Image (cartoon, grey):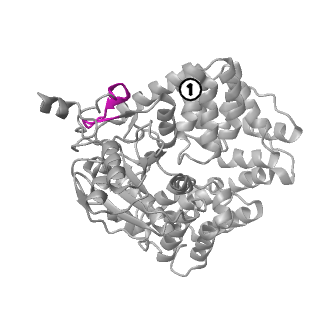
Amino acid sequence: MANVFSRLLNREKTPQSQPIPGREPEMVPNRAGGFAFQLDAWAQLDRFLILGTEGATYYASEREMTLENVGNLRACIAEDGRRVIERVVEMDRGNRAPKMTPLLFALATAHHLGNAAAKAAAVEAVPRLCRTGTHLYEYLGYQKLLGGWLGRSKRRAVERWVNLQAPEDLAYLLVKYQNRNGWCFRDVLRAAHPKVEGEERQALVRWAVKGEPPPDAEWNGRVQGLEKMKTAATAEEAKALIERYRLPRECVPTQWLNDAGIWELLLQEMPMTAMLRNLGKMGQVGLLAPFSAAAERVVAKLADTERLRRSRIHPIQVLSALAVYRQGHGERGKLTWTPVPQVIDALDGAFEASFHAVEPSGLRFYLGLDVSGSMTMGRIAGVPGLTPHVAEACMALVTLRREPVCYCAAFDTGMRPIALTAKSSLPEAMKATQGHFGGTDCAQPMLDALAKKIPVDTFVIYTDNETWAGARHPVQALREYRQKMGIPAKLIVVGFTATAYTIADPRDGGMLDVVGFDSAAPAVMSEFARA
């Protein structure tokens, strides 16, 4: 009987299919059948805001993931709606979320369901988060989905959005975002009836709602250019209007968008996000070619670190652009192009440059990449083709390039070799974890380091936290490593799906949860390792 008790109540070696004895209230079953530590509601909210729930995971459908996270969002709003909005604003300010969709949905839900304090905070937050017409339309779309957006505070949010725009900026937004997903400014302004401040804004609103031509002035030159573009009869006329009025792509009629000369003019003032999105199209029309002036311009823009920062380019946006551009065809439709090697290299450099500067810690890192079958499913932030096992390799590459003492290995239920070094390119990293399948045992990196007597200061495990196959929990393996090696090793867990649990022990100050990856993640991880 003593053997039975020691086996079933052993806190040092517990199968991952069971909770650790004495920690049962803190642990929950994950979707793979193992047990992990329960995140609190606010930590789960963070994961949802950053990662979203687009695309199914290996163990859960998109519907399951979404309903679970929406339920948690509603619970957080019921507890403190203003805090939810403050969290959304903080995520946006830090550029932590690669896509605005979860942030805008959370903002709209808190505005709709929150108390008076939450509604007041939402009115203040709408102009901050809705930097483009697309953002505003998406936000209003969620309000409509939730039950309508014509309440007083929601109309006030639209009014504040309009009045905070400088006239020239408002003119740009009106011509660039004429309609998106069934919305247009005319419908928004007619329904909201905003009290518009300033003669210039009033003139622009009259043009948007009634079609009245605004006065001939510098601040509304783009409006004049758009009106003239509607009657342009030749590509040469269109080019002259683009150059004179600095018109964006959305002002150019479809029939001129296969002209390389048109795209060459658009590229001159094209915002960074739009440029990343249109690399394939510029290649398809023949503008981007090896050693062309356009390719040199794109490379120069991607090498401009300050421009990347001002444009709020998230690393995942660069990674997504590279994933699509290097394959030579779009995810949908028939668009094809020949990738230019210099542009691919420039995207690699822009990816690394999109992260904050990191002072190397000089400590010893063991990077453990989960290459089990579950990491091959789902999408990071809804980006097609960007599965967790691709993203983890790219994230690990950043650490490999910046920390001089790094060991990198892959695991499922055992350790696997992986072709990833500090000298690997981003495309090589994207291939490094492909072709690996199996169960999941997140204790493997610690067990491997102990078996090989590898001195490690910080373990970094990239995973979806769906561990189940090990004979002991990762926290138990780390504790054994610390005791036998005499090193107070830390553990950083980088989660890639919006689940409600983690392998990191919340009681252990030597463990850190990181959600996905944003521009500050490597610096935060380095600082934690040094602390």
| Residue depicted at 65% across the width and 42% down the height | 133
In what quadrant of the picture does the N terminus appear?
A: top left
* Quarter of the figure with residue 304: bottom right
Residue nearest the observer in this picture, 136 or 437: 437
Relative image position of residue 229 (x, y in whole percent)? 69, 56
Q: Is residue 160 left or right of residue 401?
A: right
Q: How many marks?
A: 1
Of 340 and 237, which appears nearest the observer?
340
**Residue 398 visible (yes or no):** yes
Residue 221 falls in which quadrant of the image? bottom right
| Pointer 1 residue | 109
Q: Which residue lies at the image location 75% right of the left edge and 39% below the top edge?
A: 211
Image-based side of 341 in relation to 100, left or right: left
Q: Is residue 334 visible?
A: no
Residue 5, by quadrant, is top left
Residue drawn at 27 percent across, 63 percent down: 452
Residue type, numbered disc 1: Thr
Furthest residue in direction bottom, as rendered: 291
Residue 301, compared with residue 177, is above or below; it is below
Residue 352 as seen in the image, left or right of residue 494: right
Looking at the rendered structure, the secondary structure element under dot 1 is helix
- The verdict on residue 327 being magenta is no
Nearest the eye: 222 or 57: 57
Residue interval drawn in magenta: 23-36
The percent coordinates of residue 50 (x first, y second) are 51, 42
Residue lying at 60% horizontally and 59% vertically, measured from the top left? 356
**How packed is label 1: few (under 14 Cα within 10 Å), some, or many (20 or more)?**
many
Q: Residue 386: image x %, image y %? A: 40, 54
Horizontal and vertical percent position of residue 395: 45, 58
